[in-house]
Amino acid sequence: MAHALLKAHAPPGAGSVSNLPAEAELLLPYLPESAGRARRFVRGTLAGWGLDQLIDSGVLIASELVTNAAKTGCRQQMTLFVRHVSRNALRIAVRDGSCALPVLIRASADEECHRGLALVDRLTCGRWGAAVEPAGKVVHADLTIVR
């Protein structure tokens, strides 16, 4: 059975956005069921931080990023991060062991796949990206925290 490791870091009273930095991470195996774990993790994290307005978008973004990472065929664990990058922005990111960068493909109306990054792009108003690291890459997506 695959195992997930949860690490959460937050100052006392982290349920408030004013108490930065708040961050949480989850280690996941490269398995299809990791997307479900990612959704539950993001839902619980954002609810705990009082960011209920971002739960639906955050869950979809995490699911897409983890699903894409799981398809890379890597053998090491991937890491899902949820963190405040500023008082008004939340970042959801996945680090995986593949150096292949994601490509935004505009799927035609009759295609059943290639819609994940387009969805991430739409939910973040284009505020997503990827960076190559020595042992893979990080793909991130930023959501605005509306007050």
Image: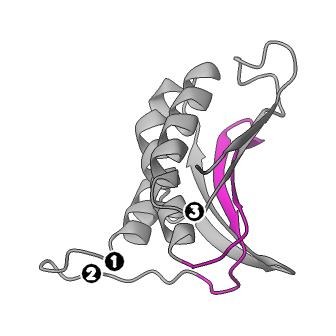
Q: State which region is magenta.
A: 72-101
Horizontal relation, residue 9 to residue 107: left or right: right
The disc labelled 3 sits on which kind of residue? Arg
How busy is the neighbourhood of tag 2: few (under 14 within 10 Å), some, or many (20 plus)?
Answer: few
The correct choice, above or below, for 81 with respect to 70 in the image is above
CA separation, marks 1 and 2?
6 Å
Query: Disc count in the image?
Result: 3
Q: Which mark is residue 127?
A: 3
Q: Which residue is mark 2?
A: 107
Q: Earlier in the sequence, mark 1 or mark 2?
A: 2
Q: Element at badge 2?
A: loop
CA separation, marks 3 and 1?
19 Å
Q: Which mark is residue 129?
A: none
Q: Residue at x 32, y 81 (%)?
A: 106
Q: Earlier in the sequence, mark 3 or mark 1?
A: 1
The disc labelled 2 sits on which kind of residue? Ala
Q: Residue at x 58, y 79 (%)?
A: 73
Q: Which residue is mark 1?
A: 114
Q: Element at badge 1?
A: loop
Check residue 78 for magenta coloring. Answer: yes
Q: Where does residue 129 sit, x and y in percent of width and height?
A: 63, 71
Q: Where does residue 60 sit, x and y in percent of width and height?
A: 42, 50
